Amino acid sequence: TDAGRAYLGEAVEVRYRLPKLWAHVVDGRVPVWKARQIAKATLSLPMEGAGFVDTHVAPVAAKLSYAQLERVVEEARVRFDPIEAEARRLLAADGRCFDVDTTQVSFNGTVDVYGTLDLADALDLDDAITARAQALSELGCEETLDVRRSMAAGDLARHQGSLEFPKRQVVLNVHTDGGPFATLENTRSFHSIDQVRDWCHASSVHVRQVIDLNEHRWNQGHDPTPLLREQVNLTHPTCVFPHCTRPSRSCDADHIIEHDQGGPTCSCNLAPLCRHHHRLKTHGGWTYQRTAARIFRWTSPLGHVYVNDLTHPRHP
């Protein structure tokens, strides 16, 4: 049967092309269903690409989300099968669409809107809707955020003729070793330089100062300077609490040793904490120390110790 052939193919994939993952399955650390999910995603990769995924995914496979797996697989495809990656990119571009389904109107007068957009267009749309939803709140609208966002989409449509839209601005923090790849930080996605070039076409481009992540920066006051905050964000892309994946740009720059207890505002004493985990540290009895550049040792109120090591080759 088709199901039997698929099962056999995934088993062979794990055994012979994903040996590190296979070892974790045999040891009972990764469930079979998760190994099959990973194998299904790597079947279309060349041997080198499968090895890349195996190295970066196997140590964290048990807690890996599907979105994180997709990002690693796509990075492997771009690195080791660029022709196929480009073909898929062009095919995806042909599949872009946007539809307002007025054929299915609910009793209370709502309709579904859905689409597949270019990433840069999607970010622009999200920014515009978010800004308008916030403006509605400030004007006294008491609806929920989701409702205000839906209202904002209608407002944008009604006022589009009277607005002068600026050219698209693409802000990228690019980390590269000279190869034809780039990582888009705000979505943590992996892209070819050709794709970035397409996004930047006819855009206003601002070149920011290059930040040395190894340089020790400091500020005399409590708040970090913009360059120091940027260095913290780039050094630690996510909240440093164990297993938290909140992007650092939406986190607080926390003083590991509190500022009012003599802790300096500097590179070695700042780390990003999302608001929830910042509260746990401030009011919940959790403490943490920085034991190395990207290694943090957390202690719970009950004395349990958790080490968050961000120096792993891949921190999905």
Image (cartoon, rainbow, N blue to C red):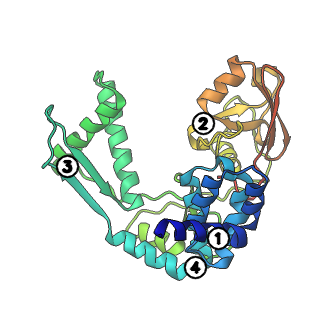
Residue at 73 percent across and 64 percent down: it is 55
Q: Given the image, on which type of amino acid does mark 4 rest?
A: Asp
Crowd rating for badge 4 (residues with CA inside 10 Å; few <14, some 14–19, many 20+): some
Q: Which mark is nearer the camera, 3 or 4? A: 4
Q: Say what secondary structure mark 1 lies in.
A: helix
Q: Given the image, on which type of amino acid does mark 3 rest?
A: Gln
Q: Which mark is nearer the camera, 1 or 3? A: 1
Chain-order first, disc 3 or disc 4? 4
Q: Which mark is nearer the camera, 2 or 4? A: 4
* Residue hosting label 1: 13
Q: Which mark is residue 81?
A: 4
Q: Are marks 3 and 4 in contact (CB under 8 Å)?
A: no
Q: Say what secondary structure mark 3 lies in.
A: helix
Chain-order first, disc 2 or disc 4? 4
Q: Are marks 4 and 1 in contact (CB under 8 Å)?
A: no
Residue at 23 percent across and 45 percent down: it is 112
Name the residue at the bottom extreme.
Answer: 83
Tell me if 124 is positioned left or right of 186 in this view. Answer: left
Q: Given the image, on which type of amino acid does mark 1 rest?
A: Glu
